[in-house]
Amino acid sequence: MNTVTPKVLPATPSATNPPLLIGDLLDSGVRMAGDNPIVYRDLSRHSYRRFRERVHQLAHLLTAQGVRAGDVVAVLDWDSHRYLEAFFAVPMLGAVLHTVNVRLAPEQIHYTMEHAEDDFVLVHEDFVPLLEPLAERLPRIRGYLLCQDAPRPLESPLPLVGEYEALLAEQPGHYDFPTFDENAVATLFYTTGTTGNPKGVFFTHRQLVLHTLGEASTFQSPGFALLNRDKVYMPITPMFHVHAWGVPYTATLMGATQVYPGRYEPEMLVKLLVEERVDFSHCVPTLLNMVVAAEPIRSGRVDLTGWKVLVGGSPLTQPLARKAWELGIDTRSAYGMSETCPLLTADILPRDIDQADFETQLPWRCKAGVAVPLVRLQVVDESGTPLPQDGESVGEVRVRAPWLTQGYYKEQARSEELWRDGWLHTGDVAALDERGFLQIRDRIKDVIKTGGEWISSLDLENLIGQFPGIDEVAVIGVPDDQWGERPAALAVASDLNNPPDVEALKAFLTGFVEQGKINRWAIPSFIRFVDEIPKTSVGKLDKKRIRQEV
Amino acid sequence: MNTVTPKVLPATPSATNPPLLIGDLLDSGVRMAGDNPIVYRDLSRHSYRRFRERVHQLAHLLTAQGVRAGDVVAVLDWDSHRYLEAFFAVPMLGAVLHTVNVRLAPEQIHYTMEHAEDDFVLVHEDFVPLLEPLAERLPRIRGYLLCQDAPRPLESPLPLVGEYEALLAEQPGHYDFPTFDENAVATLFYTTGTTGNPKGVFFTHRQLVLHTLGEASTFQSPGFALLNRDKVYMPITPMFHVHAWGVPYTATLMGATQVYPGRYEPEMLVKLLVEERVDFSHCVPTLLNMVVAAEPIRSGRVDLTGWKVLVGGSPLTQPLARKAWELGIDTRSAYGMSETCPLLTADILPRDIDQADFETQLPWRCKAGVAVPLVRLQVVDESGTPLPQDGESVGEVRVRAPWLTQGYYKEQARSEELWRDGWLHTGDVAALDERGFLQIRDRIKDVIKTGGEWISSLDLENLIGQFPGIDEVAVIGVPDDQWGERPAALAVASDLNNPPDVEALKAFLTGFVEQGKINRWAIPSFIRFVDEIPKTSVGKLDKKRIRQEV
């Protein structure tokens, strides 16, 4: 990189150059659509104007409880209007919002809350029993604010300071929020890897505002067109997971109607989808798989026509995208990870593809798409040299963008490993095509090396998933004396009692060998039908545990 | 403002947090729509991919001519693909782009080029005669790059270094652009006021990137929906005027088709509107007035149905919006000024209004709209206290946003006056309604004080403009012994040889007095029909010169 000295002029002394702060997103939403509702299950509904007022009230509540700028406020709640309020009130005070992954094991939750140095906690009553045995070993925490959907007395050894709604109602409706450095940390959460303790990733106000603006531009673009002021949004990626991909912030900037489903219960999700006429959701493939397999939807008793679903976390497969399409569900892909806030690419269909029929679109819908504005993305070989954009050359994805975590919280060695050579290393292997569309092929550590060739476990999962009677499949590499590694598969049959014939499946795969799509070593030497495939806390295939089962 | 200490964490040493630089906007456009064209008159057309390559070539060309980061590069050209390339290449080098207002008087142009400390100049051959007598008094300028639509030898005493296209063709297609401080100045241009020398306003890379993201989010929103990748854009506000409202940057971010009309010649403009199927333009009301009055359009021989026009600079009047609508032209308003980059508000119609008929929409279309994301806008009384949002309380508009000029270039006193009390003072008086829609009533200095009451010259112009046979009108205040001030009007009749009857016009205005819309002192004591109303260099009513004519 060459270094230059451009002209930097001083501002006149009285000028104000406002920092990028999360509070501005909220004000924008209220201006754009003050009457649009924020909905929580079938329990509550209020306008954006009231939403802003409640954020101000929550700030008073937290201040009264001693929360100060620089403090860390943890939240353990299902997806709710309360959580959304905390998304704003906590960072707007200059405090840090720790969105606790409630699906982790209790000891891991303890680890994250201790490591994050949580000072104050918002806890839904469902998680009180979880925290009770941990509280003694979290002496830093000054108090717990109880969140209940219906007020009722609760006996607990936790030092509860009161109930959210009851205390909120006592607060004034306007808080004079401070202005501060846009590089202040706004959010913190933990991501689990295959080894070691969970790692904390953190994002600043500046990063979240820029991510929101990038997402707003992307989500409204033709060829994507997922979200705007007149749409109804409901997340089905938990708010503790990379701020539900940052979409609650983007939806708020636009003034979109927001629906929060609480605990993810199939009946409630379907009820809200239908009754609130949800236009847009996002989720991991596993969850979409559950939706399209659910009886009321599969049978057409519940009509989801027009529902748009953004799929991320793992690649969207063609069989799943087609199954969804047949039910009227319009799927798109995006790519990112906890460390990247998360949005990196989105499959904004090029104009010619956007106007084509579904079968033409299908492979495009299952790619991860193009890098969104301000993201610089490369696919590089082992020496860090960018590979040709030919759709075939496969290497690691590395990125730069103004919204990437600047390290793992208090983890110097892992931070440097993530950022070696000044690029954030995603650990994903992928190819870029001529149009700049990214196709994720695998996690680096899940690539299978057999007979001197690399096989993508994802490619194999895609092919096996096309065989009739298979709902889900996971492929891993197992050591093999002769070939180095050979693929092995766990699969879930649509009818658990009547799984497909393994030899017929192998014959089906042999067809792809004959077409030159895979080589013959890619046919798994081992295929087993199971009732369920192990998943991580965020619904991805847990290849670490799958390896133990094979 | 209270001060707090939030948590600011250091980045891991290898981490990269990219600054917000203009080059990222260009890369985004190429990714979104590499095949979309950039069109210049009926003379040239190339893809976004080629556009990027030409920007890289221009950077090589400028570097070869000795242009360095921190230098100032002036452009005197009509709206062109070359200008667009300079919008990117100059700032991407870390140099400052000075967009010279070619409509100023030669001595004013000399003032701005000397004051800006221009080092190098891109000049269209039409402006060579203008610069020749000035060049001796601009000794700092190292060279002049000639821009021609058709190559031909040119004799000139200017130290011309060669012709744009000829030199560009010799350059390599990839430039390794530097990374630098996002607070580096990217652009500089001059705005003229009623008194004194032109004032230089300047914008940084950070400000322009944020303005672009704000515009991208706004321009794609429902209720506005002016621009996206699949639209064709042509400016009719010169590129020297607040970077054509920043829209070339926004169009580039999105990958929209861009059409540059060169010198604004009615025939070429109409030809391009029709043949390129332009979806979206922006201009001042005066220009739109000319368009709707042009014979081929008025007669319906040229059909502009579906053309969306964003009107700014001065408020859009209801008669003009209606006349446009009858010709199939869809008008919207925005508000801003040179000092504000410019976008502050946009009339994003609320959902209920957006779905209503034109007559219901009309008053909304003529308001300036709501503050766009990240803009904080207040209407305040003389003590700086925000006024109620009741649609009636009138006061000065003051703003904060992350894209406001941080002062006038080398003008300390005027900078502090602009920014007194930490808000940028627009000098406009306006009212905010219950929905946060801004209605500009006047420039502070144009408000007429008569009989102890304030009268908005704009309101009066709106009412007079509704009288049949009047094409254009300007109202000013003239001193009056009895009333303090009284309004006086200059008007242009549709039929210059047969102007409307002045007494009939006064009787028409008396009707509004009876309806309580204006008080009786508001009826101008003096109404004169003229062939033309004086305009400023950017097409606004020139009230300073109008005062001299009354």
Image: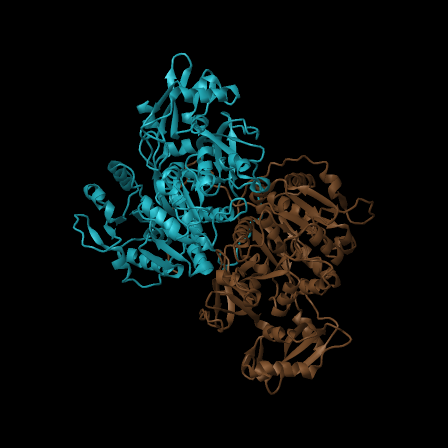
Chain colours: A cyan, B brown
Q: Quadrant of residue B493?
A: bottom right
Q: Nearer the viewer, residue B410 or A318?
A: A318
Work out whether residue B328 or residue A118 is closer to the camera in this orientation and state it. Answer: B328
Q: Position of residue B348 (x, y in %)?
A: 52, 59
Which part of the image, by quadrant, shows the N terminus of chain B?
A: bottom left
Seen in the picture, residue A141 relative to B177 is either above or below; the reply is: below
Q: Quadrant of the C terminus of chain B?
A: bottom right
Tell me, yes or no, if residue B419 can be seen here. Answer: no
Residue B248, given in percent of the width and then of the height, sits at 62, 50
Viewer-nearest residue: A112 or A106: A106
Left or right of B386, for residue B532: right
**Quadrant in the rendering for residue A457:** top left
Query: x%, y% of residue B437?
Result: 50, 65
Residue with the most extreme top position: A482
Residue visible at 65% across and 82% down in the picture: B506
Seen in the image, is B160 located left or right of residue A523? right
